[in-house]
Amino acid sequence: MLKVKNIKFIIFLFLGIFLFQWVYDFFGGTEAVDLINKKRNKLYLLVLAHIPTLYFDSLTWFVLLKKRSISFWWSFIITWIAQTSGKFFPTGNVTGEFVRIYLGIKKGLSPHEASSTVFADLILATFSLFIIGLFSFFLVIFKDSSLIDSNYSHYIYFSLILIFFGCIFFYFLIRRRLLRHFIRKYNSIFNVKLNKKTILFFIKLDISLYYLTKRKVVVTKALFFRLIGWLAGAFEIYIFLLIMDVNVSILDVILIESFTGIIRAIAFFVPAGIGVQELAFVAIGSYVGLSPSVSFSIAIGRRVREFLVGVPAIVAWLGIFGKHLKS
């Protein structure tokens, strides 16, 4: 018998597939595929363009780790595999972060250190995404004030508002120790008693997150690398559009990368962001003046890159951690 979570997964997966098909039919999917087919011999460049993004994402997590518990090389490999499991497989970004925690523990991290640093990395990703999204939006409307009230501006405003509230929530969660209070009230709210091991884990997680914020130099450095990582992601789009012979400004691709990232983060419950990612690229691409077919080709190009980067990551996962998976 299917569990409730499995039913939810299937429902959201089919909704995502339906949304993908709708975007494909109504926003020039055939033309987008034709554009990519004409340049398919150059798509390997997308893998090379992704290396800086993966490097800075890995460096962010590595900086957060206390006493360099694992080497940067291992943080790079684990981040690579984790991102693949969240994007290449139809499981979602959250599942990918659980994979990063799991593999971090297998390489010697304590459960609370792996969990707290990955969670802190997610929070920094949220803050940095808001910063770069807001900054790029103001620069774009400064260049062309008519974009303030364009057809797609409501996507921008909605995304900024939601990610802003996400930042506020994470701030109070850590600084006000809301996790600790939640554990105390859990029994009375849900009428379910947690075992001592689970309670101890969440207490350590709460303490680790709180004291991590006291390491201001470390957090600032990690936030900086996260920001560079988002810019590197925008550079990937820029390289793709160069391959497609489409002229676009750096500022435009930063806006596309940041707001598609925001929309996909909001829709984390949709497996692999299927359909949501494609719609986001079309909406934000149209906002900066790209045709629907070109915008959709960016979305397909991102999927192609995820596949090209993901297959070697799965091979690496099975080759390096295969014994752990069997045990």
Image (cartoon, rainbow, N blue to C red):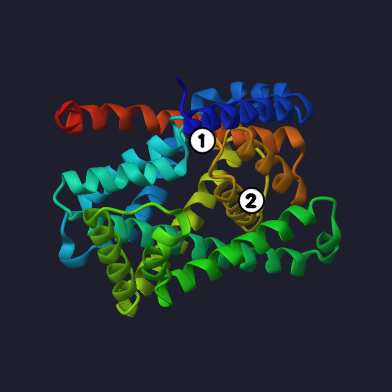
What amino acid is found at the position of numbered circle 2 in the picture?
Ile
The answer to whether residue 272 is left or right of residue 48 is right
* Horizontal relation, residue 104 to residue 267: left or right: left
Above or below for 239 versus 65:
above
- Depth check: 215 or 210 in front? 210
- As helix, strand or loop, the secondary structure at mark 1 comes to helix
Residue 164 sits in which quadrant? bottom right
Q: Which residue is drawn at 76% across and 45% down?
A: 286
Q: Which of marks 1 and 2 is in front?
A: 1
Query: Can you give x and y, in whole percent of width and height, for residue 199 in the image?
Result: 28, 59
| Residue visible at 16% across and 33% down in the picture | 324
Three-letter code for the amino acid on which mark 1 is drawn = Ala
Instruction: Compute the Cα span from label 1 to label 2.
Output: 18 Å
> Looking at the picture, how far across and down is residue 299, in whole percent?
61, 36
Considering the image in quadrants, where does the N terminus appear? Answer: top left
The residue at the point 29 percent across, 75 percent down is: 211
Nearer-the-camera pick, 37 or 23: 23
Reading the image, the residue beneath label 2 is 256
Q: Which of marks 1 and 2 is nearer the N terminus?
A: 2
Graded by Cα atoms within 10 Å as few (under 14), some (14 to 19) or many (20 or more), the crowding at tag 2 reads many
